[in-house]
Amino acid sequence: QAKEGREHILNKLTECIAEPRADLKPHAPRIETMTIPKEFIGAVIGPGGKIIQGMQEETGATITIEETDGVGRIEIAGTNKKCIDDAMRMIKGIVAVPEVGEVYVGKVRSVMPYGVFVEFLPGKDGLLHISEIDWKRLETIEESGLKEGDEIKVKLLDIDPKTGKFKLSHKVLLPRPEKQDKK
C-alpha cells in the first residue's frame, strides 16, 4: 500500500515537472565559490577590509574568504544571479594578471600633454601615449577628444621589465589607413 502511494505521488510530480529546471529562478538565493592565489587575498580584502566591504555594498552579495592549502577560497552568496556575477567580475578584475597582447576596455583616469593614463583593470593604470591614440599625427591631446572618465578600448603592448609600467595602444585596434603617394 505504501509503495502504491509513493508511486502515485511520484507520477503526479512527474506530470507537473518531468525533470529539474536547467537554472534556478532569477531571485532564488545562490552560492558560488572560486579560488584565487594566496598572494591576492590581501588585495581582495583591502586595507581594513575596505575593498571587500565596498564590493558587498555595491553588489548586495555576501563575500567570505578563507585560506586553505595555500589558496584563497572565496564564497559569494546572494539573493540573485546578477549580484553574484557582479561580485565575481569585480574579484576577477582584482586578481587578473595583465597579459601583453590582451585587449581591455579601460577608463581614462588622467589627461597629460603627452598622453592619457587609462585604468584597464581595477588598480592597473597604463599610459596611452599621444602617438598610440590614432594613426594620424596629433599635435595636442585635445585633438583626440579624450577626457577624464571616457571609456576606450586599448591593447596592452608591453610591460616594462624594470619599472613594471604598462604601455597601451588604441591605434593598433583601428584599421590602418592606406599610404598616400607623394607627388
Image (cartoon, grey):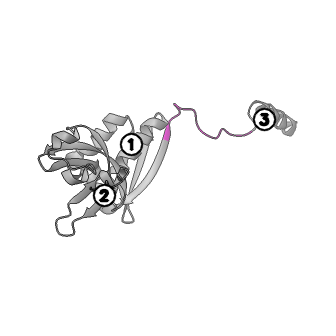
From the viewer's side, name the closer residue of 46 and 113: 113
Point out the stretch of residues depicted in magenta.
19-30
N-terminal label among 3 and 2: 3
N-terminal label among 2 and 1: 1
**Label tally:** 3
Q: Which amino acid does label 3 sit on?
A: Thr
Residue 51 lies within the magenta run: no
Q: In this view, does 136 lie to the left or right of 65?
A: left
Looking at this rendering, what residue extends furthest in the front direction? 183
* Position of residue 5 measured from the top left corner of the image (x, y, whole percent): 84, 34
Q: In this view, does 119 lie to the left or right of 72?
A: left
What residue sits right under mark 1 in the picture?
87
What residue sits right under mark 3 in the picture?
14
* Gap between marks 3 and 1 measured at Cα: 36 Å
Q: Residues at badges 3 and 1 in contact (C-beta under 8 Å)?
A: no
Height in image: 44 above or below 25?
below
For marks 2 and 1, give the one nearer the viewer: 2
Which quadrant holds the N terminus? top right
* Gap between marks 2 and 1 measured at Cα: 25 Å
Height in image: 72 above or below 46?
below
Q: Which residue is drawn at 76% across and 37% down?
A: 18
Q: Which amino acid does label 1 sit on?
A: Ala
Residue 31 showing in the rendered view: yes
Place residue 3 in its image quadrant. Answer: top right
